[in-house]
Structure formats: structure tokens, C-alpha cells
Image (tube, rainbow, N blue to C red):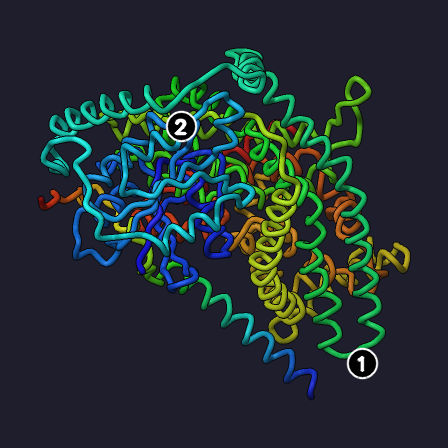
Amino acid sequence: MKIALFGNPNTGKSSIFNLLTGLRQQVGNFPGVTIEKKIGAFNSVKNKHQLTDFPGTYSIYPHSKDEEIVYNALTNSEHEDFPELAIVIVDTSNLERNLLLFSQLYDLKIPLILVLNMWDVAERRGIKIDLTKLQSYFPTTPIIKMNARIGLGKDRLIAAIDELDDKAKKDAFIPSSFPCLIDDKEAQKEEVLLRYEKIREILQDVQHEKTTINNTLSRKLDRILIHRFWGYFIFVGILLVIFQFIFSFAAIPMAWIDDSFVLLSSWMGQQLPSGILNDLFAQGIIPGIAGVLMFIPQIALLFFFIALLEESGYLSRVVFIMDRLMRPFGLNGKSVVPLMSSIACAIPGILATRTISDWKERMITIIIAPLMSCSARIPVYTLLIALVIPKTYLFGFVSLQGLVLLALYFLGIVSALLLAIVLKKFIRVKNKGFLIMEMPEYKKPRWGNICITVIEKVKVFIWDAGKVILAISIILWVLATYGPTGNMEEKIAQAKKTEFYQHTNEVQKQSIISSAKLEGSYIGIMGKFIEPLITPLGYDWKIGISLIGSFAAREVFVGSLSTIYAVHDENEEHQNLLTHLKMARKADGTPVYSLATGVSLMVFYVFAMQCMATLAVVKKETKSWRWPLIQLVIMGALAYIGALISYQLLA
Amino acid sequence: MTQEIVVVTMVILATAYLVYRVKKKFFHSNKSCETCAFSPENKSSTAKK
């Protein structure tokens, strides 16, 4: 049987979908997590079923692209997604708003099951529903109470599917011609008002509410957490704590992983017979992969805190206060969720813009979303901060390194808001959308869920970034090891003639020869070619090559640097990346990674669109090359100018 | 000689993988995505009663 799940946003549809199908579709605590239909399958006692999870909608009349999917599937019985049975999921703690969609589906005469989800939340809020009375209003529709978070009511739902009498006759909920035309907004308004009147009548009869301690506690907490001033102050405080943890706690396992790879590289070098395969592993693949894996602790911690904030219900408050902050910048209320999602990754953020009905608003949100610092920037930021920012504490407990990380995140947010103002001048928007969202009650986090989220995210980070970095490391190693015939020898001969080489010690001599060899390689030639363009930013050609490599993905920057320095130091003791970078010197003996160069690189990565996957998603979503190219140029220009100013001011 | 063959194979595979990824990301049409057909010209159609 073809079964479909419908309901308002954030009522637990995806949780029920996962519960029935055993799949792990992403669930969230704010609207807009499901932006396209998802299909799965499950078996009941009697039958096999196909289950479709549709995006959340308040009414069948669409206001955005994602809501159109629902309208199209329900209003045309020939549509491939027209369901044989619709399960309507409602939030029991807010029946008045949720029953509107149910009443519309009821009048479409599709066989229905009504699921009163979040029954526990309603009880905690002191809401009591008389199920028998409610059933009497809809005698042919099975009504099931559920708590999808813990799987309660699953068996009852499956039994109801098997026992459903799809031939049962229904009376109309309201006497009107239904559905209205999609463009007839006046008729739609009248119909909705009529439905709400009837829903209120029913609820007066079946619903009783009293104030509870839990309810009061949530309200009391909200008085502070979404306060016009203290709300932002607390949010900044929480971010600061997260970044402090990232620096204080992740540094130890990070050093273990890094050192383990140094040992592995050294061990591999001894085990494999000497030759180019040995070199490829020791100088190319292992350092490249180490460059990704060493950041697992930071990424895991970041996602742990994001999941913790979401599970507790706080993230919805952040969306609320950010909405208030973004309005003066002319941003659509519905832009908030995509922008907040982009802090984890820009791709789901850009997909979430489908909830924005106005295409101009949507385009502005798509363009600014990648400016929000995503998790892929964490490896770059933390490496550079550890390199150039001293490990000192302000007031004895606030880590300067954590503070700089916080500042980089804010630079991303502020520049996104400013760019939105500029874009508004060029892309004029007539209609402004509003964000409608339910504030979930504060809840104890489910640690199991948090662990699953962290493991899944880390897996994606390692697998997705790892494959690209592995491929790039192999190619980089070849380009750094070989060069045009005689070129490397010529560079070595030139280096040996210098006065510095004649009068220096053996270790320095080895280093000079390695540098000369690398300069004579294909990668050295490419690097030297682009050097004039990046010298004003404070970068040498090795950084330049890593910047080019990271056009695929930002985290490739670290892997590329790791491979280049491993090839450079082929004759020296194996060292970890941070030590390599700290010891790197310019021709005049000054450090390559000075404060000015480090800050310039950080600023570059705040602005630069170094993510192929994001560009591909923008191209897919806008169905044209124009917008991703505009985005690439804008962000590239911002990155170059920002890095140039930072370096010139600090150098 | 064996080492050289392994390295060359790995380089070819790495290059092929990167090309495949770029091609898949930018030129693969995702048919399961209904809302991707987004453009200012693509407005909602009027429903049939």
C-alpha cells in the first residue's frame, strides 16, 4: 500500500518515518529539516507498504517550493505520489494549529489515520485530550496517541494500518468547494477561517489545559534565554565555552593522532622495500590522511555541542533570537534556519532555502550562506590558531585561542549580514516571508541520539573529505617528487653555489637541497608561477599550492600542506605537521607563519568559497552556472581583499 | 618495476576519481529531487479542480 506522512513542520514526521522504516533520516528540532520527500518501506502483519515522508506544511496550499510537493501529490489522484492512505501527524500540545491540515485532508476523502504525537509533551504542559470525544467527531478515522521519540505507539499504528476500512464514508468537515484554486488567495483565506472556527468548537469540547511546573519552568527560562539583551549575551557565552572546550580538550587527542601518524609513517618506511612506493606512502598518503584524521576530536566536539543544544531545545531559541537580529538587515525570517544550518555545513543550509517562497530572497540567502563558518573550516582555523596565536589566558580562564576562533565565526556572520544589505540594493525584494516556529519545551538530552549524531557526522567527514584528500595527496606527491628533466638538478646546483650554503651546518645544507629540489619539481614551477599573486597576502608558493588544492574542499588545505612539507623534509626525521610549519623559514630566516600571515590566511578562509560540493549544490538548486559563478567571484574577491588588508596592517 | 606499476596505477585511479567526482557533482541530474527545478520563471501552476 502507498502510505504518506503529512503534518506541520516539527511534529515528528521524520521520527515516525525512521521508526517505521528503520532508516535514519535526519530529524531536527526546528522547521525545514525535511525539504524534499523521502521514501522508505516497511511491513505490517498483513502487507508490505511504501512510506513517503513529505515536507512539513501548515496547510495544503503551498507558500514555497517544498510545500508545493504536498499540494501536487494530494490534489491529483493521477499523481505518482497520490497516497492510498495518509497518516497525519499532529503535535498534541498544539492541536488548534495542527488540525487545520488534518481537516483539509479529511475533506479530500483520502483514507486517514490521525496520530497524536508528542502526547508526553502535551501532558507535561498540562493539556488533557478526551480521546473518546475526539474520536466521536471523526468516527471513521482511527486516532492513535504516540510518543515517537521513544517509539511508544508504533504497534498501535501498525495495527491501525492493517485494520483500516478504506471504504468507510466520511462527512465533510466544512461545507465548501474544496480544494480552492492555488492562486485564489481570498477563497483560501475564507476556507481556512471556517475550518479554524470548527476546530475551536471541537477543541473546546475535547481539550482541557492547566498550568504545570514544567510549562512554567520553560517560560521562566525563556524569559532570560530569548531576552532582547541577555539572550544574545548568553548565546555568545555558550559559543565561547564551546570554543574553549575545542581548544582545551581536543588538543590532547589531536596531538596523539598526529604523533601516531608520524610513527606509522616511519614504521611504514622501514617495512616497505625502499623505492617510490615507499616514498609515496611515507611522504604522500600517510601525511595527507593524517591531515584530516587529526581533526576528528575538534569536529566531534563541535557536533557534540550542536547536537546537545538541539536536543535540549535551546537551538530553537537561537533561531528565534537570530531572526530578531537579522530583520534589521532586511533578511527574510525564513533565512534564519538555512543560515544557522550552514554553521554545520553550507549544503543542508542551501537546500533548506527551499522553504523561502520569494526567489530573490532565496537567492540572497543562498549567496550568503557559505559565509557562515562551516565545520570544514575548523581544521584550517585550529591549525592556524595553534600556529600563530599564543596559548595564553585572559583573566586567568578565557583562552585567547578560543576567543580568536569565536571572532572568526562572528566575522563570518557579520560579513554575511553586510553582504545581504549590499545584495538587497541589486536584487530588490517585494514580499517578505515570516518564520513561524514552535518553541519546543526544554528537554533532557538523549545521550544515545547525541552519540549517533556525532558518529554519523564524523563518519561523513572522514569518508567524504578522506577520499578527496587521499586522491589529491597522491597527485600532489607525484607533482612534488618529479620535475622537468634536469630542472631539479639545476636548482640544487644553484643552491649549492650560494654563500649561505657554503658556511652553514649539515642539517641546514640538507634542508636547502630539499627546498631546491621541491622548487625544481612540477609543483614548485606551478607554485612559483602563482607566487606574485599571493606574495602581497604574505603567502609563499607552498601555501599557494595548498590554497589551489583546497578549491575542492577547505580541509584539503591541511592535507596538502602536510604532503608538501613531508616531501620537503624527506631526508630529515619524521615530524608532525605543526612542528614542520613552526620551523618553516623564509630565505631571510624569518618564520613563514608569522602572525600577519596566519591572520591573513584565517581571514582568507572566512570569506573564500573553497568548496566544490557547495558550488555544485548552488548550480543544481538554481539550475544555472550564473549564480555559483557570481558567488565564487564575490567570495573570492572578499577573501583576497580581506587577506590583503589583514596582512598589510599586521606585517 | 612492480613499485612503479603500483604507483602509476594509483595516480591514474586518483585522477579518475577526482574527475568522476567533479562530473558527478556538477553534471549529474538528480531525478529524485522535485524542487530543484527552481527559477524565477518557474511559477506554481494552477491546480485542477
- Which quarter of the rendering shows the N terminus of chain A? bottom left
Q: Is residue A481 left or right of residue A638?
A: right
Disc 2 residue type (three-letter)? Asp
The label on residue A508 is: none
Residue A577: image x %, image y %? Answer: 75, 52
Residue A98: image x %, image y %? Answer: 34, 31
Residue occupying the point 79% across, 47% down: A253
Q: Is residue A390 above or below residue A610?
A: above
Residue A648: image x %, image y %? Answer: 60, 31
Q: Cβ–Cβ below 8 Å for labels 1 and 2? A: no
Q: Is residue A555 left or right of residue A121?
A: right
> Which is nearer the N-term, disc 1 or disc 2?
2
The label on residue A130 is: 2
Give the label, 1 or 2, closer to the camera.
Answer: 2
Instruction: Give the residue at mark 1.
Output: A273
Residue occupying the point 78% across, 58% down: A512
Disc 1 residue type (three-letter)? Pro
Comparing A236 with A577, the one in front is A236
- Which quarter of the rendering shows the C terminus of chain A? top right
Q: Secondary structure at mark 2?
A: loop
Q: Is residue A182 left or right of residue A93?
A: left
